[in-house]
Image: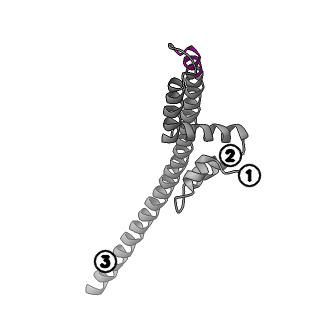
């Protein structure tokens, strides 16, 4: 199976967040998601900008069509519609990643709260035992002094 762009980006970390890794693996199972990830990665790169500079320069320089470049305008408009869709897909993916991390953090906070409550109970038990030992030691001392 091909790695998704997200999995590739996570792979440079020594130990990526396991929840994000699982999310990326689930996302990579869908062909549509892999295609959207690749298009989003390409359209957000400088190579995309350079390709368009060359394309527009050649289109105008070679005189593919006369000014006001109606066909070029239509092609660029269609491209903008599709790219805006991919931007929304990318934002949705980022929101999903943030939600995965937030859910993991919430579970961690809940577990920490449970552990803190347990530690407080243990501390209370230690305090009570210490008071009992102190009380018995004082009782023995007062018996020994009489």
The answer for how far apart the CA atoms under marks 3 and 2 are is 69 Å
In reply to whether residue 74 is colored magenta, the answer given is yes
Q: Residue at x 46, y 64 (%)?
A: 122
In reply to whether residue 146 is colored magenta, the answer given is no
Q: Residues within 10 Å of mark 1 (few under 14, many from 20)?
A: few
Residues in magenta, as a range: 69-75
Q: Are marks 2 and 1 in contact (CB under 8 Å)?
A: yes
Q: Earlier in the sequence, mark 3 or mark 2?
A: 2
The answer for how far apart the CA atoms under marks 3 and 1 are is 73 Å
* Residue 137 higher or lower than 16, as above or below: below
Q: Is residue 132 visible?
A: yes
From the viewer's perspective, is the residue at label 2 or at label 1 nearer? Answer: 1
The residue under label 2 is 28
The residue under label 3 is 138
Closest to the observer: 71 or 124? 71
Q: Residue at x 57, y 17 (%)?
A: 65
From the viewer's perspective, is the residue at label 3 or at label 1 nearer? Answer: 1
């Amino acid at each position: 199976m091909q790695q998704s762009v997200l999995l590739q980006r996570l792979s440079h970390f020594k130990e990526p967040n396991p929840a994000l890794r699982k999310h990326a693996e689930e996302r990579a199972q869908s062909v549509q998601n892999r295609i959207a990830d690749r298009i989003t990665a390409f359209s957000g790169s400088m190579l995309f900008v350079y390709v368009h500079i060359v394309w527009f320069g050649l289109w105008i320089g070679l005189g593919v069509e006369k000014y006001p470049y109606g066909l070029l305008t239509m092609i660029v408009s269609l491209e903008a519609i599709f790219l805006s869709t991919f931007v929304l897909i990318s934002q949705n993916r980022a929101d999903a990643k943030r939600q995965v991390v937030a859910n993991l953090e919430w579970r961690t906070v809940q577990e920490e709260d449970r552990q803190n409550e347990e530690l407080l109970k243990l501390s209370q038990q230690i305090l009570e035992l210490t008071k009992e030992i102190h009380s018995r030691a004082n009782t023995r001392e007062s018996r020994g002094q009489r």
